[in-house]
Amino acid sequence: MAKVLTSRKEDYAQWYNDLVIKADLAENSVVRGSMVIKPYGYAIWEKMQAQLDKMFKATGHSNAYFPLLIPKSFFSKEAAHVEGFAKECAVVTHYRLKNDPDNNGVMVDPDAKLEEELIVRPTSETIIWNTYKNWIQSYRDLPLLINQWANVVRWEMRTRLFLRTTEFLWQEGHTAHATKEEAIEETGKILDLYAEFAEEYMAMPVIKGTKTEAERFAGALETYSIEAMMQDGKALQSGTSHFLGQNFAKAFDVKFLDKTGKLDLVWATSWGVSTRLMGALVMAHSDDNGLVLPPKLAPIQVVIVPIYRGSEQLDELDITANRIKTDLENKGISVKYDNRDTHKPGWKFAEYELKGVPVRLAIGPRDIQNGTIEIARRDTMEKTTLPQDGIVEHIEALLEEIQLNIYKKAYDFRSDNIHEVDTWEEFREIIGKKGGFVLAHWDGTNETELKIKNETKATIRCIPLNAKKEEGKCIYTGKPSSRRVLFAKAY
Amino acid sequence: MAKVLTSRKEDYAQWYNDLVIKADLAENSVVRGSMVIKPYGYAIWEKMQAQLDKMFKATGHSNAYFPLLIPKSFFSKEAAHVEGFAKECAVVTHYRLKNDPDNNGVMVDPDAKLEEELIVRPTSETIIWNTYKNWIQSYRDLPLLINQWANVVRWEMRTRLFLRTTEFLWQEGHTAHATKEEAIEETGKILDLYAEFAEEYMAMPVIKGTKTEAERFAGALETYSIEAMMQDGKALQSGTSHFLGQNFAKAFDVKFLDKTGKLDLVWATSWGVSTRLMGALVMAHSDDNGLVLPPKLAPIQVVIVPIYRGSEQLDELDITANRIKTDLENKGISVKYDNRDTHKPGWKFAEYELKGVPVRLAIGPRDIQNGTIEIARRDTMEKTTLPQDGIVEHIEALLEEIQLNIYKKAYDFRSDNIHEVDTWEEFREIIGKKGGFVLAHWDGTNETELKIKNETKATIRCIPLNAKKEEGKCIYTGKPSSRRVLFAKAY
């Protein structure tokens, strides 16, 4: 077999790019920084969406849809927000094209200039809070728990498939509450939901924490995030949940009458995950042979490949394979039976390895005689031959085992690559050479954080929620610190 | 009760607008021509999406995602297409804002002008066919059956909630085929799928047909549509399926090697339905009391309202109501038990009538004694009291009956308002006064079609597929015609 992918060891970034393209997940589009999400990649995203959507609804949230285009002036209403987003927006200035008199093409019609420019949403806090103003009058209208599935555009200079693209797909939750406590509780509830999704569905362990001031969302009082470790030891922020205080209520004048008849500003949260999770999924588990998908998110969980010579043998195999397929499907397992005669079994084996199908069954004439079937699991590449009797139950259990094993492998990898560090020398050594996560003391200032970043490229990923109280000294300045924070280079 | 809606008789257009807003389906956004789809409206759209998506997948289609922003030059590659769409596009010319030195706001950064402007997609044929060029080399890559759920923007001058908005949500299918026959077959298959969805889920009878040249999609060789009658007798085009021939393959140079090794242009189709269907659903069935939703698309199929005095009575009712709720939910029926003490039963009755909940149950202390429950259906407003025993089976059957009854009512209304007309005088009379659909002979020319439109505002909605051969004379010119076409005023 020709080698399809650059190995991770050789060039991790190139391996990732090769894999996303070769496994048919996505490709770069002709429009700078935008991607095309291909059917196989989109099928994984749909599984993520379906599960997240179910979890949002189970916690009382409803979906709605707000406009793509936002008046420019909205962006200057919340001071911190404009600083964070104004630098990277697609701006609509005209609403018509016309035939170009000088050639065969089209040109922008100068007569169709908008009075006020419109911004393609980079995030929707402004338009949503401008709408909430009319929806919220009294405490009876609260809480308002709304989510939106949408596309957003941020004009990124350096883009990478799924990880950072000009346009991406995401969900953005925007909730409104009567009290500060309730809004903070919501922020935490969503953080837990994201962590549960990452760990139980993506099989990706995450660390929950709060962001430092420097890394906070533009307009938030507190940003919570989940951080995952990729196989190169770098961190990938996989979801954020923001406590916005009363900032947006103030900016858009959203007040409500509380139970005592007093007028007060509404408390807000916002939270989101995006197609970036696709990048995380790929980088957390896959190997030099291709994708390794957790069964819960695999579009095809089991593939069956017949090994045969001639159509007579195939006809016979079809009967058994289709029976097994139906039995598996009746248990809610998604199965593909690939009996195409245009490709050889070896080609199919490599293809489904590349695509990360968790379980592969192969069946040939001898298996028919013996009542057996060959079963291979993608995560460990182990092969065994088993009786056809009881194969469905075996596969059901195996899919669960694979899901857990993928999680365990990622968890063990992370454990091996988290280091408690107490000296600046060791910090530089580990961040510079071994990589991984570093738990170290920090003096709590923006200034120190920035200096560490400039010298090592490592940033504070989060202040872990479960960090224990521990007296120590900042690795950089030696000033006192009461708990360790999480440093890493990050995507 | 205060009257909430303008009646249909009084002002049909106002009734529609009132209803969409009062039933919490959608509202106008601050951005000209854009709407906010509110949670209740979006829940109906999600039910439509889920069903359509299932039908697309069952017929072999996969979802994918293509960029929102399309290079301007792409629009001039297909001559007819540019004429149809260039007039109404949102144009992105810049990619950055900056602080305005003259005030506290932000301004477009003149240094961030794009070399080539980008168009917010009004439809995606161009970007998709530019992508397909790289995906299709041989007949083995065909057919390519892809659908996209997306938002699109068309700069409409006169907008109405759901029916015509600057931004709307839709699905657009884009398929590629090796032969003309196969592409035409696909176009027809999708038309049938749309008709099945409209009739079986929306309970809305439709007429399938082909569009005249004047009404064809920009770039298509043939456009098929389904046309539904609204309660004011006007037609609403509810879905279109286009046979694009080789026009887009030609424009974007998409060729494939056929089985004989010959290079040929690929054949194309595209097809879509949009949030416009929400408008159709409202206008087809609802009445002066509010929405009438077919059970298959109702977010809440059954609402239970307790009638009580004091919390002791309520506690008792809660037990029975929750038991019935659980029993119904176990049958896959969506139920809301509204035991809020902030609103009176009368208010709740009116509210769920407005929201179109198909079945309302009311239960009071006497019902507990007698083992009964009051059941009201939204479509006929009939109320009966029934034993609680067997109520689940009764409701299951009733929901099916309501679904069929709503369809039948719309079907009968349409039958009463379709007229075969043979004289110009009668045509003008009916179109001008009674309204409804008119089946009449037409000489087949654009010119006559346009004159009829100018004089009566009626257009040819379609040439029905099931039209029988029948010799006749054009109602306008008296020239010979071989079958009747469908005229109506349209949304």
Image: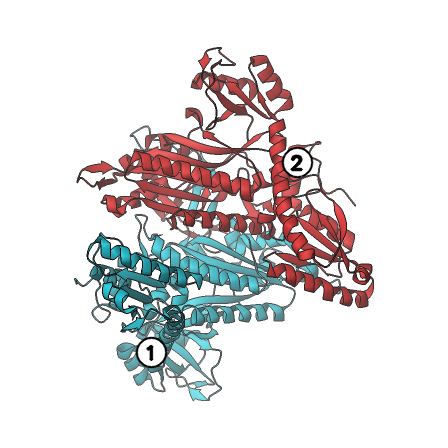
Chain colours: A red, B cyan
Q: What mark, if any, has residue A98 been given in the picture?
A: none
Label 1 resides on the chain identified as B
Q: How far apart are the two marked residues, 2 and 1, measured between alpha carbons? A: 63 Å
The secondary element bearing badge 1 is classed as: helix
Q: Amino acid at mark 2?
A: Gln
Q: Quadrant of residue B348?
A: bottom left
Query: Considering the image in quadrants, where does the C terminus of chain A appear?
Result: top right
Query: Considering the image in quadrants, where does the N terminus of chain A appear?
Result: top right
Q: Amino acid at mark 1?
A: Phe
Residue B401 is situated, as x and y percent measured from the top left of the image, at 38, 74
Q: Which residue is mark 1?
A: B413
Residue B354 is situated, as x and y percent measured from the top left of the image, at 27, 63
Q: Residues within 10 Å of mark 1 (few under 14, many from 20)?
A: some
Q: What mark, if any, has residue A14 been given in the picture?
A: 2
Q: Is residue A280 above or below residue B318?
A: above
Q: Is residue B445 above or below residue B194?
A: below
Q: Is residue B181 visible?
A: yes
Residue B246 is situated, as x and y percent measured from the top left of the image, at 59, 63
| Front residue (pair B438, A243) | A243
Q: Is residue A115 visible?
A: no
| Front residue (pair A79, A348) | A348
Q: Quadrant of residue A75?
A: top left
